[in-house]
Image (cartoon, helix red, strand yellow):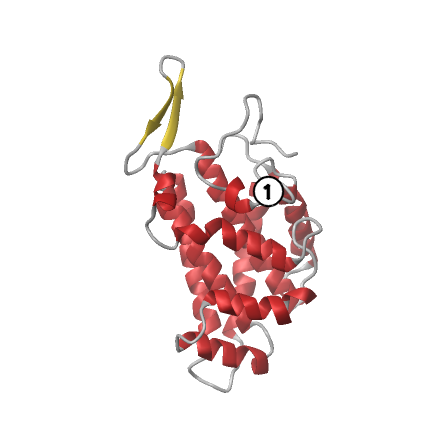
């Protein structure tokens, strides 16, 4: 990205500390059921692997691959969130999920009812349930190869001679599509950091906690995301801005 916005710089700086905190927290969890005990830690490993691979695929112009991996990250983050709750609450939910009796979406419904009211606000004044619901909605269509997912395979190539043309290919890079997916990456990093802070604030030192607060404010002022609007529309691949609007800057 030519102009690196503050949310990108802060998000990249927080990636390693937040990943380390998640791995430490979930590795040390203890449950009575050995079938359940490794699940949150495995979810962190999947979250990190998918996020790292999505970042690389996005850089290479494989945007459809990158965005479907973002969907995987969100599902893994749900399991992490459940796993970090008190064992009496988390164990039956994780067991039901591992046995195919509950989906990740159903686990989020449990969290919304029982846990998320204690997490405070999202990016602006919305509840955590509204924030996470918006994030989930923005990647929901990309669980399968679909026309919606295929939309990420097109790139807009602009030149003085030909104007704007649509191109396809195995590694067709589109700056605006790449930026939207990068913002999703940073939203996932911030959300996982907030979940860790709700579990144990000592897992991130004061400097990183301050950077987390700065990151939330920087995302909230991004020109790619707007309060009180549907992220499922804002972060679709084919959305275009009016002439003269600079989506690279902060609001």
The location of residue 98, given as percent across then percent down, is 41, 75
Residue 90: name its quadrant.
bottom right
Of all residues, the one furthest to the top in this rendering is: 161
In the structure shown, which secondary structural element does the residue marked by tag 1 occupy? helix
Q: Closer to the camera, 23 or 98?
A: 98
Task: Identify which residue is drawn at 44% across, 32% down.
Answer: 175
Q: Quadrant of the C terminus?
A: top right
Of all residues, the one furthest to the left in this rendering is: 170
Q: Closer to the camera, 250 or 28?
A: 250
Note whether 168 is above or below 48 in the view shown. above
Task: Identify which residue is drawn at 65% across, 52% down.
Answer: 212
- Category of crowding for the residue at label 1, using alpha-carbon neighbours closer than 10 angstroms: few (below 14), some (14–19), many (at least 20): many
Task: Identify which residue is drawn at 39% across, 74% down.
Answer: 100
Residue 4: name its quadrant.
top right
Note whether 200 is above or below 251 in the view shown. below
Note whether 169 is above or below 30 in the view shown. above
Number of labelled discs? 1
Residue where numbered disc 1 is placed = 7
Do we see residue 178 in this rendering? yes
Of all residues, the one furthest to the bottom in this rendering is: 32
Residue 129: name its quadrant.
bottom right
The location of residue 71, given as percent across then percent down, is 44, 54
Q: Is residue 226 rendered to the left or right of residue 69?
A: right
The location of residue 222, given as percent across then percent down, is 61, 38
Q: Is residue 214 rendered to the left or right of residue 232?
A: right
The location of residue 249, given as percent across then percent down, is 60, 31
Do we see residue 15 in this rendering? no
Task: Identify which residue is drawn at 57% across, 27% down.
Answer: 246
Q: Is residue 199 rendered to the left or right of residue 33?
A: right
């Amino acid at each position: 990205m030519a102009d690196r916005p503050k949310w990108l710089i802060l998000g990249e700086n927080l990636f390693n500390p937040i990943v380390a905190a998640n791995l430490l927290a979930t590795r040390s969890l203890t449950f009575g059921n050995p079938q359940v005990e490794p699940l949150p830690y495995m979810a962190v490993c999947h979250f990190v692997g998918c996020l790292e691979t999505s970042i690389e695929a996005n850089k290479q112009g494989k945007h459809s691959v990158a965005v479907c991996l973002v969907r995987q990250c969100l599902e893994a983050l749900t399991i992490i969130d459940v796993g970090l709750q008190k064992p009496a609450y988390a164990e039956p939910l994780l067991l039901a999920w591992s046995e195919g009796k509950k989906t990740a979406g159903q686990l989020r419904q449990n969290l919304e009812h029982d846990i998320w009211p204690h997490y405070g606000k999202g990016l602006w004044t919305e509840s955590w349930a509204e924030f996470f619901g918006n994030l989930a909605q923005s990647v929901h269509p990309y669980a399968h190869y679909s026309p919606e997912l295929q939309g990420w395979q097109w790139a807009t190539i602009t030149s003085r001679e030909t104007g704007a043309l649509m191109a396809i290919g195995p590694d067709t890079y589109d700056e605006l599509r790449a930026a939207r997916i990068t913002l999703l990456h940073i939203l996932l990093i911030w959300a996982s950091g907030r979940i860790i802070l709700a579990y144990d604030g000592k897992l991130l030192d004061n400097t990183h906690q301050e950077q987390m607060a700065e990151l939330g404010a920087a995302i909230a002022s991004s020109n790619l995301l707007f309060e009180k609007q549907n992220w499922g529309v804002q972060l679709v691949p084919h959305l275009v801005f009016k002439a003269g609007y600079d989506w690279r800057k902060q609001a």
